[in-house]
Image (cartoon, rainbow, N blue to C red):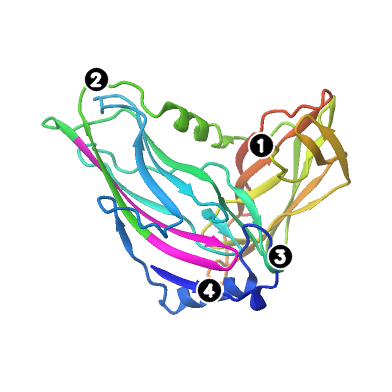
Amino acid sequence: MTMLKASRKDLGKPPFLSVGTHWYKQILTALAFGLWGTTSLLASSPQPQDIPVALDLLADRTAVTQGGVIRLGVRFQIAPAWHIYWKNPGESGFATKIEWDLGEITTSSVETVYPVPVVFRGAGGVISYGYAGETLLFVTVRDVTLRPEAKNVKVRARVRWLMCREDECRDARKSLEMELPVGEAQPANREIFERFASLVPVEGIPENVRVDTTITSSGLTAELRAEVPPKTFGIVREDSGEARGLYFFPNPVKGWIVDTPKLVGKVSEVATKVGRLKVFAEQPTVSIQARRTSSTTSGPVEISGVLVQQFVKEDRTLTPVEIREFSLTAGK
């Protein structure tokens, strides 16, 4: 495991869960020159006391059933003041990745599901996306097909992640494995799988959002205009305790650079059942810029990502968080 540190003189006084711009440049330099070292943390080995992220491999069934469905996930338990990164890390860090080996389950591929992240604002205005506290990245295997002779299924997950706090980042790898019997199954780990499944986006543009796109010489500009629904005080402006603020998290798109979204709108402060919150009292706009990389010279312009919004109702309670994923394509 490699550790790089930035002094407080370099960083200034960064806020909670931040990564400074000076530190960000060190990360990029280390990656560019191949100097970023890693240490494999074997699942069978004791978790070192100074590792701020603990990992577990979980299943939502007690066994694997022919023709059935099973979810498999890696749980990250993250120490206070540390965070890890989403599939698009934003302006700093790199994505948390999992390579799956499903053993006796014959399937061409599975895709890791990432629950919606939160925004970390670092020194110098650096914006990154990721997780703090606890998260679960998982896959769902449907219509399970097993080799005829299978009696047990050994599942392996090879995980790589970057964990950061205000003045330090660590790159790590860990291999996890578990063995499940083949046969009739009962539910397992239901609470954690359902909790994080509820944070997975639903496809489609929200009904209260209007999208305008403009082709530019370098790519695409998109504006998402969110109408404030009737009988509400507004749309939550920023994360605060139990509330989730309006935000668009761009997915990584090969050949394109999507800049950090900008939010514009009139903000007021409202007393709610969970405390005072800043809200957009009128129609806010989320502005997004997508630019071609030097290797992308033609083809359609695409922006893809996850839009999060939550409303304050007339009785001063909050609506459930709405999480939608969609893509916008323009040009030929």
Comparing 178 with 230, the one in front is 178
Q: Earlier in the sequence, mark 3 or mark 1?
A: 3
Do the CB atoms of the residues marked 2 and 4 lie less than 8 Å apart? no
Q: Earlier in the sequence, mark 4 or mark 3?
A: 4
Q: Rounded to the nearest whole Å, what is the CA distance between mark 4 and mark 3?
A: 19 Å
Q: Amino acid at mark 3?
A: Gly
Rendering coords of residue 204 (x, y %): 62, 35
> What residue is at 27 percent from the left and 24 percent from the top?
67
Q: Earlier in the sequence, mark 2 or mark 1?
A: 2
What secondary structure is marked by label 2? loop
The residue range painted magenta reads: 153-172
- According to the image, label 4 marks what residue? 5
Q: Rounded to the nearest whole Å, what is the CA distance between mark 2 and mark 3?
A: 52 Å
Q: Earlier in the sequence, mark 2 or mark 4?
A: 4
- According to the image, label 2 marks what residue? 184
Do the CB atoms of the residues marked 3 and 1 lie less than 8 Å apart? no
What secondary structure is marked by label 1? loop
Do the CB atoms of the residues marked 4 and 3 lie less than 8 Å apart? no
Residue occupying the far left of the picture: 149
For label 3, count other residues whose C-alpha is less than 10 Å away and answer few (under 14), some (14-19) or many (20+).
Answer: some
Residue 236 visible in the snapshot: yes
Q: Quadrant of residue 283?
A: top right
Residue 227 visible in the snapshot: no
Do the CB atoms of the residues marked 2 and 1 lie less than 8 Å apart? no
Which label sits in the foreground, 1 or 4?
4
| Magenta span dominant secondary structure | strand
Q: Rounded to the nearest whole Å, what is the CA distance between mark 2 and mark 4?
A: 51 Å
**In the figure, 160 relative to 26: above or below?**
above
Q: Earlier in the sequence, mark 1 or mark 4?
A: 4
Q: Amino acid at mark 1?
A: Ile
Q: Earlier in the sequence, mark 2 or mark 3?
A: 3
Using residue 309 as the reference point, say whether residue 58 is left or right of it: left
